[in-house]
Image (tube, rainbow, N blue to C red):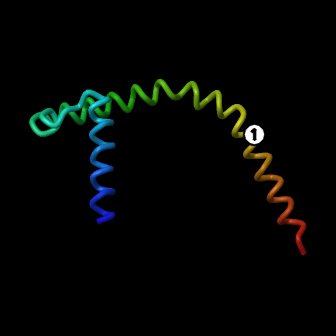
Amino acid sequence: MGWVVRTLLLCFVVGLVLSFLDINPTSILTNSWATIQDIARLAADMFHWALPYILIGAVIVVPLSVIGALMRWTRTRHRP
């Protein structure tokens, strides 16, 4: 019973996302190649939109991650 509910919920979420992206079942079934191209274009657009934010975040996150890794490495190195 739990599997059925999870499957229905997943179908709902996927359908909602596809609807938000203006992809309908008819276009998936009748024009698969164009749908694949549309999805690829949407993914590329999303990447181009997100890239500046990823780079801005990396300015802070990467140095902090390196510092944290170095601190963990030095703590484990000095253990007897």
**Left of 45 or right of it: where is 19?**
left
* Image-quadrant location for residue 44: top left
Residue marked by disc 1:
63
**Picture quarter with the C terminus:** bottom right
The location of residue 17, given as percent across then percent down, is: 33, 36
Sort mark 1 into few (<14), some (14-19) or many (20+) by Cα contacts within 10 Å.
few
**Left of 11 or right of it: where is 55?**
right
Q: Residue furthest front?
A: 1
Q: Residue at x 65, y 32 (%)?
A: 57
Picture layout, residue 78 above or below residue 51: below
The location of residue 72, given as percent across then percent down, is: 80, 58
Q: Residue at x 86, y 62 (%)?
A: 75
The location of residue 59, given as percent across then percent down, is: 70, 31
Q: Residue at x 83, y 54 (%)?
A: 71
Q: Residue furthest bottom?
A: 80
Q: Residue at x 30, y 36 (%)?
A: 16
The location of residue 37, given as percent across then percent down, is: 25, 31
* Image-quadrant location for residue 29: top left
**Picture quarter with the N terminus:** bottom left
**Left of 43 or right of it: where is 26?**
left
The type of residue carrying mark 1 is Pro
Helix, strand or loop at disc 1? Answer: helix
